[in-house]
Image (cartoon, helix red, strand yellow):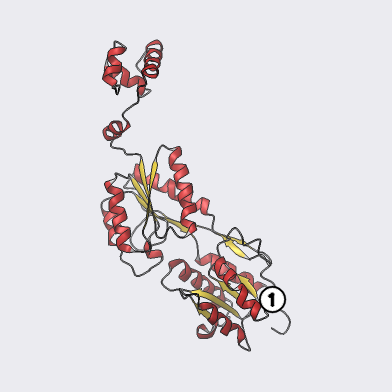
């Protein structure tokens, strides 16, 4: 039989209000009576009705985490951190995958709200498909429902936290320029992807400021889902005047380029320097180790969680757009161009 707070009050020969004050750790009860009620609750196995308590407080202690694509391990790392911090505060975290589909993202938001999530962390599909609709996010904002984006959508007053990309790519490219490279290519351009587009923007900015020309038709390899971009990379590197350095969109691209480079007899960094983004766990163990960037995922996740809690406390808080700087990690895959390059 379930013991209620009323039953407990009768057993203790006191009022339900007194028992409630004890169980809620509120003042106004003598130490002896408090100790007696707590001991009695323990003896009879009283379990508070958390659902009823939460309903009374208009709290569910539920947060929502919506990933654009959970097949991407980056989102899994963010989820682990958010879950751990949420549990410390007594929150459960519901998880959903949008599969890079805007309608699925909209549906996930509706489901989270039906389950009384108090706030949402959303990694938006628009980061992957820049032309996708965001009316459902605007609806959330107009309703003052607390949510924070783990991506960057400007112009709508959304709260977001993400790694800074443009200055990072500029810094990475300047590293190559300072080594003496004047013919630098870019591998993996995808204009639908916000992060990649911003990396390309920072790359172009560094070249412009140093008055280094870029032939986009020859020196830029575009992303292709079937990995045939490696064929385009081979064609680029077969040219008589090929780049002496490449900026690649992430560490995985650098890894996938290993075999094509070997077939061409190109040795990194003697014949070609490679700089990239992401600092995958294996990046420093490759031979040569990769010059790359560190996104500070822990700092990004912490800032997202803190901002969401602030919005839950004060939905009228002015929007915050937070960009977390990345760190340049210089390793063995970049070096000055060889003589005659």
Q: In this view, does 327 lie above or below 315?
A: below
- Label 1: how many residues lie within 10 Å, few (<14), some (14-19) or many (20+)? some
Looking at the image, residue 180 sits to the left or right of residue 82; the answer is right
Q: Which residue is the site of mark 1?
A: 267
Tell me where residue 295 appears, x and y as whole percent: 54, 58
Toward which corner of the image does residue 16 lie, by quadrant?
top left
Tell me where residue 336 appears, x and y as whole percent: 70, 74
Tell me where residue 243 appears, x and y as whole percent: 61, 81
Badge 1 element: loop
Q: Is residue 156 above or below residue 234?
A: above
Looking at the image, residue 5 sits to the left or right of residue 79; the answer is left
Residue at 43%, 67% in the rendered image = 194
Toward which corner of the image does residue 174 lie, by quadrant?
bottom right
Tell me where residue 326 appears, x and y as whole percent: 55, 59
The quadrant of the image that shows the N terminus is: top left
Residue at 30%, 17% in the rendered image = 8
User: Residue lying farthest bottom?
Assistant: 240
Which sits in the foreground, 50 or 294? 50
Residue 323 in sight: no
């Amino acid at each position: 039989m379930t013991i209620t707070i009323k039953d407990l009050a009768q057993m203790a020969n006191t009022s339900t209000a007194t028992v409630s004050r004890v169980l809620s750790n509120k003042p106004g009860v003598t130490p002896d009576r408090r100790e007696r009620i707590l001991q009695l609750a323990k003896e009879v196995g009283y379990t508070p009705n958390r659902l009823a308590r939460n309903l009374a407080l208009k709290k569910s202690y539920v947060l929502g985490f919506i990933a654009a694509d959970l097949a991407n391990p980056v989102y899994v790392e963010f989820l682990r951190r958010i879950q751990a911090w949420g549990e410390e505060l007594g929150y459960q975290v519901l998880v959903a995958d949008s599969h890079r589909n805007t309608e699925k993202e909209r549906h996930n938001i509706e489901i989270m709200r039906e389950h009384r999530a108090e706030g949402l962390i959303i990694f938006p599909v628009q980061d992957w498909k820049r032309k996708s609709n965001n009316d459902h996010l605007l609806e959330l904002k107009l309703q003052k429902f607390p949510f924070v984006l783990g991506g960057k959508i400007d112009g709508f007053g959304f709260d977001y936290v993400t790694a800074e990309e443009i200055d990072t790519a500029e810094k990475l490219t300047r590293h190559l320029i300072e080594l003496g490279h004047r013919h630098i290519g870019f591998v993996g351009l995808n204009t639908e992807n916000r992060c990649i587009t911003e990396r390309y923007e920072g790359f172009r900015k560094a070249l412009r400021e140093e008055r280094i020309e870029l032939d986009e038709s020859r020196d830029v390899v575009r992303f292709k889902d079937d990995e045939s971009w490696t064929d385009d990379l081979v064609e680029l590197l077969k040219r008589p005047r090929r780049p002496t350095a490449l900026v690649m969109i992430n560490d995985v691209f650098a890894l996938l380029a290993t075999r094509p480079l070997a077939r061409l007899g190109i040795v990194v960094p003697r014949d070609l320097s490679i700089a990239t983004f992401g600092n995958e766990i294996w990046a420093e163990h490759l031979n040569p180790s990769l010059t790359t960037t560190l996104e500070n995922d822990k700092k990004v996740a912490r800032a997202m969680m803190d901002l969401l809690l602030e919005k839950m406390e004060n939905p009228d808080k002015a929007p915050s757009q937070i960009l977390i700087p990345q760190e340049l990690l210089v390793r063995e895959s970049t070096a000055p161009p060889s003589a005659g390059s």
